[in-house]
Amino acid sequence: EIPLPLLTTQQSIAKILSHCDTLISLRKQQIAKLDELVKARFVEMFGDPVKNPKKWATKCFDDVCDGIGDGLHGTPEYDDNGDYPFINGNNLIDGHIVITPATKKVSADTYKQHFIEISSNAILISINGTLGKLAYYNDEKVMLGKGSVMERKELSFTLHQRNTETASPPRLAVSCSA
């Protein structure tokens, strides 16, 4: 036998839960409206990306990169004494690969097992967690976690940080010129 609270207590609890349910529903509506606002602001600032009414210069990926790759979609066996940092989007900071004390490491054997060749002219792009973080790859001996690798052709790419007063958190953007 399970003791039940008094009817007035049950009704009070039901009223609180109903109020919580209403608040959750309203929050979902707010999120949907904010999503619409973000899309509208994007189109207002940059125009429709398909129609391109602002005549932004466009290029096919084939024209600006030799290939697009990806890192490991899993968790390797970590080794505190390993020689190879296992990097992800958290390590892509201000256009550089930054290894911190929190960066996990892997052994030489694990590195060789999951080796992905990355050319020295590649740009690393985070595709999960904080999306769109970028860094140049400069032949660091690292093991790439889930993230994209864009192999640049012979173009001049510049990574730059947007104005931190208007973008929170600051993000990196890519511009390129032939």
Image: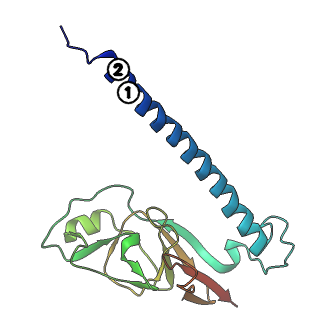
- The residue sitting at the front extreme is 8
Residue at 52% from the left image edge and 71% from the top image edge: 132
Name the image quarter holding the N terminus. Answer: top left
**Left or right, residue 68 beside residue 86:** right
Amino acid under disc 2? Thr
Q: Marks 1 and 2, how far apart in space?
A: 6 Å
Q: Secondary structure at mark 1?
A: helix
- The residue sitting at the left extreme is 81
Give the image location of residue 50, x and y in percent: 80, 64
Amino acid under disc 1? Ser
Residue situated in front as seen by the camera: 109 or 91: 91
Residue situated in front as seen by the camera: 27 or 54: 27
Which of the 4 image quarters holds residue 9?
top left
Q: Are marks 1 and 2 in contact (CB under 8 Å)?
A: yes
Tell me if residue 64 comes above or below residue 71 in the rendering: below
Q: Secondary structure at mark 2?
A: helix
- Residue linked to disc 2: 8
- The residue sitting at the top extreme is 1
Residue at 84% from the left image edge and 77% from the top image edge: 54
- Residue linked to disc 1: 12
Residue at 62% from the left image edge and 89% from the top image edge: 154
Tell me if residue 93 comes above or below residue 2 in the rendering: below
**Left or right, residue 28 beside residue 76:** right
Name the image quarter holding the C terminus. Answer: bottom right
Residue situated in front as seen by the camera: 2 or 68: 2
